[in-house]
Image: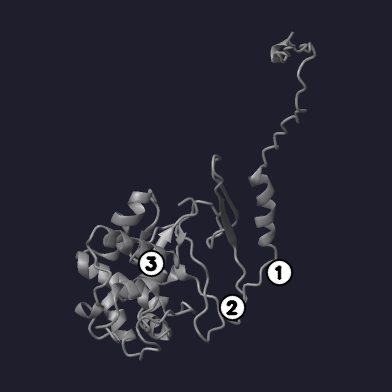
Amino acid sequence: SVATTVAASPTSQPQSTEPAPTEPTTPRVTEPEVDLAALLQPIIDASLEPGALDWNCCGVDLPPTSVRLGVRVTGHDDVLLSSGVRLDGTPALAADPIPGNNLGHSLVKQAALALIADGTVDPTATIDQWFPDQPNADRVTVQMLLDITHGWATSTDFITENLLADLARTWTLAETLGLANAQPPVAEPGTFDQTWDGNTIGMIALAGVLEEVTGSSLADIVHDHVTEPLGLSHTFVGVGSDDPADLQLGLFVLPGGTDAIDPRDLSSVAFRTIDPPSSAVITTVPD
């Protein structure tokens, strides 16, 4: 006889009636919503207390009278806060129009990139076709203006001197560059300016190129190619005569002066037009 061994079928094994073990679950903890407004308001209030901020850059103490703050968190409403008073003594509002200062550099660069992208501006073009008197104009390209590799001088003292000579004068970008071209270059074209000090002259020249190529003003170029597409309805390049009536400006001290000056008493036309990328932009915290 032959003995035959047959392996037991897996299904023939006894089946457990116990429930399968489950991994322990950790209850979900929902973080409480933080009231940012309640958290931040006391901080900005405290920033205006006497001695809280050292605001002496020119030998004259100029403590701020107000502060504005905007916080944006994805999925939540913007938090807009203000504290203190305007120069006229009325309460400061978070949406007050304010100077954009060097935001203008970003706007000019973005406008240039948009015009390069649509083929209007050639980044390899040298600027001698528009501003032949600039140092090394036949070797400095539009791209070098964007990259701060033009090699031009970094001093901008000539801007302040000429600005103060006539506060009501309307400057063109070509006139400002005419003042700048008297300064010898500090480096060869293609040399990156690690200090970024030369960015001022480069941005004035870039703005001038955009105006020459398009035949439009810098204000219209920035509006059409940057602020309008982005929905920045309260951000624009001003010319001084179009400053909003409630524009909030800071006190300042003239070089060598000892008294704070209220800018509301002065024309801002020269200030806006002699160096628009640095001085002409008006904006708001919400924008």
Identify which residue is drawn at 41% across, 60% down: 282
Q: Are marks 2 and 3 in contact (CB under 8 Å)?
A: no
- The CA distance from mark 2 to mark 3 is 22 Å
Provide the residue designation for mark 1.
51
Q: Secondary structure at mark 3?
A: loop
Numbered disc in front, either 1 or 3: 3
Provide the residue designation for mark 3.
280
User: Relative to the observer, which residue lies in front, 13 or 270?
Assistant: 13
- The CA distance from mark 1 to mark 3 is 31 Å
Q: Is residue 156 left or right of residue 124?
A: right
Provide the residue designation for mark 2.
57
- The amino acid type of the residue labelled 1 equals Gly
Identify which residue is drawn at 41% across, 70% down: 279
Q: Is residue 283 left or right of residue 34?
A: left
Pointer 1 or 2: first along the chain: 1
* Residue 270 can be seen, yes or no: no
Question: Can you give x and y, in whole percent of width and height, for residue 44 in the image?
Answer: 65, 56
- The CA distance from mark 1 to mark 2 is 14 Å
User: Relative to the observer, which residue lies in front, 226 or 255?
Assistant: 226
Q: Secondary structure at mark 2?
A: loop
- The amino acid type of the residue labelled 2 equals Cys
Q: Quadrant of residue 152?
A: bottom left
The N terminus: image quadrant: top right
User: Relative to the observer, which residue lies in front, 80 or 206?
Assistant: 206
Q: Is residue 35 left or right of residue 148?
A: right
User: Relative to the observer, which residue lies in front, 123 or 256?
Assistant: 123
Pointer 1 or 3: first along the chain: 1
Badge 1: few (under 14), some or many (20 or more) residues near its Cα, within 10 Å?
few
